[in-house]
Image (tube, rainbow, N blue to C red):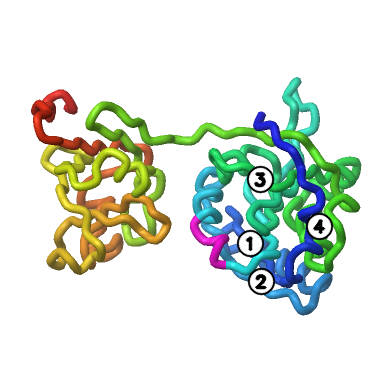
Amino acid sequence: MAKLENNSSKTSENFIRMQIITLTTDMGLQDHYVASIKGTILSLVPEAKIVDISHTVKPFNISEAAYYVSCCFRDFPKGTVHIIGVDTEPIVNFGGSDGSFPSILLFEGHYFISNDNGFFGSFLQENQPDGFWRIDDVLSNKKLFSFPTKNMFVPIACKILNGEKIDSIASPFPSYKKAFALTAVLETNLIKGNVIHIDSYGNLIVNVSRELFERIGKDVPFTIYFRKRDYFIDTISTTYNEVSEGEKVAIFNENGLLEIAINRGANGSGGGAEKLFGVHLGDVVRIEFTPRGSKETLESLF
């Protein structure tokens, strides 16, 4: 569990009241669930603006949900409320567990409503929140458990949109659950990262940030290896079109993470990096740096 100190003065009255709610769920769009959530929001706050981040999160995959939200929440105005409808059913003293409870996180002027199932830890990583609360007044009503995103999260989100103080609708809590997350490993002249996301184009997103890369690799020759030793890139491009169509390319994307792609290639057209390279989520990506005077160590990587 990650310990924290709530700053209860930083509640919704501190920000311009923006009646914006984002939705991130694993519900898909085939069924009625998302429409039901939106209808409930509009019944409670008719002027609310609802934005879909994604409804195609893999079922119960809180890490994927955290990735989607972390990539775009700063594009919204402060005061936005983000509902995360993934693995939402609370667990109350189940099998000796300390449970998972519907909760509210305040971070950088944004509100995040989720089950405390590891999402908050995965989303924040090493960052510290400005406040954290448990929504405990809903736990005694078992009828709400059948559709927690609609029955628990939405009413609280709408109260925040209407300017109610957090402390009047939830209780400050000193910790949230940490979550296991793949992190890049830094060794001598080597970074070992992992593919943490594959987007709809088949582009590979790697958990190596520009900051980490430049910490040891700025102006130093390097080679990026992935899947097989035959697949490598030794240049970071600024845009996809810096390489010819159909060629492999590495860039740092808008979120500052390493991305490996095929220029103008995409899954569905037979040209995505995922399919052409046979790379999967979790696969290792190695970046070897060869500063002047260092030994050749490529063979040790395979």
User: In the rendered view of the protein, which quadrant contains the N terminus?
Assistant: top right
Residue 32 visible within the image: no
Q: Earlier in the sequence, mark 1 or mark 4?
A: 1
What residue did someone put label 4 on? 156
Which amino acid, mark 3? Pro
Name the amino acid type tagged 2: Ile
Residue tagged 3: 129
Mark 1 touches mark 4? (CB < 8 Å): no
Real-space CA distance between mark 4 and mark 3, rounded to the nearest whole angstrom: 19 Å
The location of residue 227, given as percent across then percent down, is 22, 39
Q: Residue 23: which numbered mark, if any?
A: 1
- Residue 286 lies, with reference to residue 112, above or below; the image says above
Q: Nearer the viewer, mark 1 or mark 3?
A: 3
Whole-angstrom CA distance, mark 1 to mark 3, is 20 Å
Q: CA distance from mark 1 to mark 4?
A: 14 Å
Q: Which residue is mark 2?
A: 50
